[in-house]
Image (tube, helix red, strand yellow):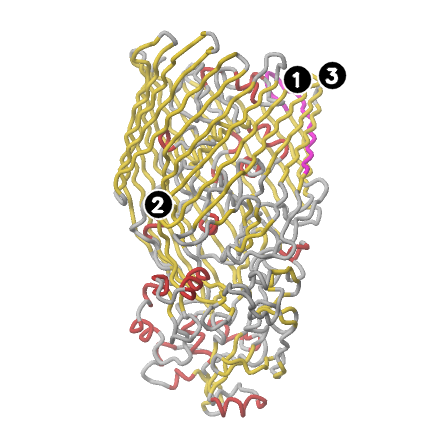
Amino acid sequence: MSVLLAGTALAAAFPGAASAADEPKAADIIVTATRIVRDGYTAPTPVTVASAEELAKATPTNIPDALNKLPNFQNSLGPGKSANNFSAIPIHGNILNLRGLGTPTANPKGPLRTLIMVDGVRVAPTEYIGTIDTNVIPNLLVQRVDVVTGGASAAWGSDAVAGVVNFVLDKKFVGLKGNLQAGTSQRGDNNNQRIGLAFGTKFAGDRGHLLLSAEYYNNDGMLRDARKAGQNGYAWVGSTPGCVNTTSDATACSPGGSLNPYKQAGNVLISSASTYGKLYNGATPLGTKLNADGTVSPFNTGTATGSAGIQIGGDGYTIPAHTTAIAPSKTYQNFGRLSFDFSDNFSAFTQMIYSRTEIAYDAMANTLVQGSPTATIYAGNPYIPASLASTVATNGSVGIAAYYSDNQTRVRETTDFIQSTSGIEGKFGGWKVKADYTHSESTHNMTQSGLWDWKKFFAGVDVVSVGGTPTCRVLTDPTVAAQYAGCQPINLFAGNPAVSSPAGYAYATGTSQYRARFKHDSITASISGSPFSLPAGPVDIVVGGEYRKQSMTLTSNADPANLDTAAKKAAYFAGLRGVQSASLYYWLTNVGTANGSMDVKEAFGEIAVPLLKDAPLAQQLSLNGAVRVTDYSTSGTVTTWKAGGTWKPVSDFLLRATYSRDIRAPNLYELYRGDTSGIGIVLDPVTGLNQNASTVSGGNPKLKPEVAKTLTIGGVFTPSFLPGFSMSVDFYKIDMTGAIDALTAQQILNICGTAGTAPECSLISRPNSTSFPSMVRITESNISFLKTQGVDIDASYRRQVGKGALGIRLYANYLGQFDTQLYAGQPVVHYAGANVVGSNPVSYPRWRGSLSVDYTVGPIGINIAEQYIGSMNRFLNASAPNLSNFVGGSVPAYMYTDLSVRARIPHGAGGYFEVFGTVNNLFDTDPPIIPGITPGVNLATNISTYDMIGRAFTAGVRFKF
């Protein structure tokens, strides 16, 4: 998928492009696919080019939102494509996922393997986990976006396995321009506003140039229950209750097995808890539950399903629909650039990006579902109702598992990002020298309030009567009373404890918080030129070097490493009863501290050799090669390379091919992050229970770089008999080995259940050999491989029609293969043509496309854009791909239509005032219902692929003077 820039070919690449005054001159064009910079040189690596003006016509919110509608990008993260259940990892922002190569099983970590640049300079991670929120880039000054859709590590370095996205700024802009717009959905939510202003001027006799811009974007967000997909409690459940296995396949009766395929159902609940408390004797349910008024009644088990611990209707629980689907957010973006030409042969510049993102949302509620039960109430507690007195007297205690859906926790996250780059460029005797230095810092702060502070919670629920007054038992123990000063009793038998025991609830809840800081410093220098010429033209070379240093520090008030031994836990929870073995500081969010750094030293070179020119059947024939040697302080030395060539037999047709070795080195988060707690529903093969299991995940300093081999073969057709038409078709194939991935908790349990002596069994902690796991440890390794191949198509056509200008642009992708194997011995999973069902759903349609038709006549313009998502004929179970039998396992093709109308009033030389209006999802197409397997864990559709907002309107003004 590409249109290569070479000389004035840029104009042909943009349908309905801006006026010639807005387009860069040929001498200014730098082809992102190569470091070779020479007018007329055509690189062999495919590049898709999209002008900022064209992207804004159909998607006025911002450029990254528009890019995510192109078929190059799949399963990206964005404002409407992120789950908001947990806050331990920042998974927000516009994070581009080129070719969907972000790890399919670990997308919460964020799509990686795509290098993001601004004017050929690497953008440092905006989050400590290694992801880059492209909202930090100054939208108003972006001239175009170059998307390199082939491996580019030899030219640009690590991370360019899927390719490169280079935001090219209009560094010569002079004048004042801006925009003011507002939008809303048809249903009155997802309200958003964008304001931006950019200024550019020359000074010192046109030798100096100053650029400034400031932009603000606000989105009020929306809730899950505001859409059909968020209502009715949809989930996939086993379709055969009481399944009897009559086959030799031990998994045939498992949910998703051949005898118990998944079916879609509504009002699906988890049986292990209820709204105000399911009652237990130890780990055995008593068959009763607490009501809001403190009475006890039978627990209604609803309608049985083929999934253990999952029921339809009755008294179970689910994550409530009245939670955040799109998190309210604010983004502040500022940019400044100063450049100066000291002479015709020497110039210097300095520039800075500053961005701040604020996000707030309601995460999972403050509940008692960490275990079944979570709270144990002992005999003598004065709050025990009379109806339970005999039961408690007999058993000595009663257990409670409850999901208080009204007690949602509040998350606030802020990210401050700054990146400054200074550089020089010079020409000396036909050679060009470039050098630049970049410094960036990212600071992420997270607070989650209203969480159970487990130490205080277990103190508050263990109540005794002192002189007729309910009192925390620990206050009667002089050896530990000082640790629990201020303890207030909590009554769990009278409905929601936030209402029944406000003082106790306030005492037992607190705020988990962490602060992460990421620093990046790099120096890059190169020299390029033509040392000699061949009959077909000059031989061009580039040689250079790069040094990078990155560091990460993370501090937290809830580091699980501080409670990683029995002795540490005993000291911390001293004097308490009923503490679960998995309990840490807080419910849900316990983030480990981290401190790590790496140094990277690189040397690179590239050469372009013309072989033939203006010969019969060879108007142009050239070869291109690049090599890069990189030394990582964390993992040693690795070499990347690229070889390619172009052949232009006639003026209308160009053939090209490349073969490359590319890498992605493990980032600091993967290497050095501290232990972080998590939770998720698992089906335990040992006990048969299907309920929440606690997990701990951490970094692995032994990780090595991922390695990929990339092949691209294609051609560009620009027929002279059809002026204004251009089309490229490119085949690509990527084979990656040593991919960094991690087994899920369910996969670890399944492997150990199949082979009881497997190494994975050491990752599971149980109170005894027959108990449900108290903890499952998750860690990443170089265990996976990934293979993908397909075809990219890019076609454009421009011509005059009547009194106006018509522009048509088509992007399309056919996905022939997307295979992974998570670990040796697992069957290869075929993702192409499948919707992947899980907590973080993704999809891999065979066909995706984007078609835009633009017509401008006088001051009036209209743009119609169609986005096509091909049908998918099957579903895959993300946590257990071998259990992927679904009833009705297909989704038809979907199309979304965007309509934009504009009226432009010219002003002066090249200036204008434009009023515009856009309707996205014109026909208000609802997304397909594709629920998860865990009830309520996500909106019941594939949020990475389909639009969940519905028809939305944007109106505003743009101006340039």
Query: Disc 3 marks which amino acid?
Result: Gly
* Mark 3 to mark 2 CA distance (whole Å): 56 Å
Q: Position of residue 884 (x, y in %)?
A: 55, 56
For the residue carrying disc 1, how many other residues have a C-alpha within 10 Å: few (<14), some (14-19), or many (20+)?
some
Asked if residue 177 is among those painted magenta in the image, a careful observer would answer no
Q: Is residue 231 above or below residue 707?
A: below
* Mark 2, residue position: 666
* Mark 3, residue position: 802
Please tell me which residue lies in front, 956 or 24: 24
* Mark 3 to mark 1 CA distance (whole Å): 10 Å
Please tell me which residue lies in front, 693 or 350: 693
Q: Position of residue 466 (x, y in %)?
A: 45, 90
Please tell me which residue lies in front, 699 or 331: 699
* Mark 1, residue position: 799
Which SS does the magenta portion mostly show? Answer: strand
The part of the chain drawn in magenta is 897-912
Q: Residue at x 41, y 70 (%)?
A: 774
Q: Position of residue 402 (x, y in %)?
A: 54, 73
Label 3 SS? loop
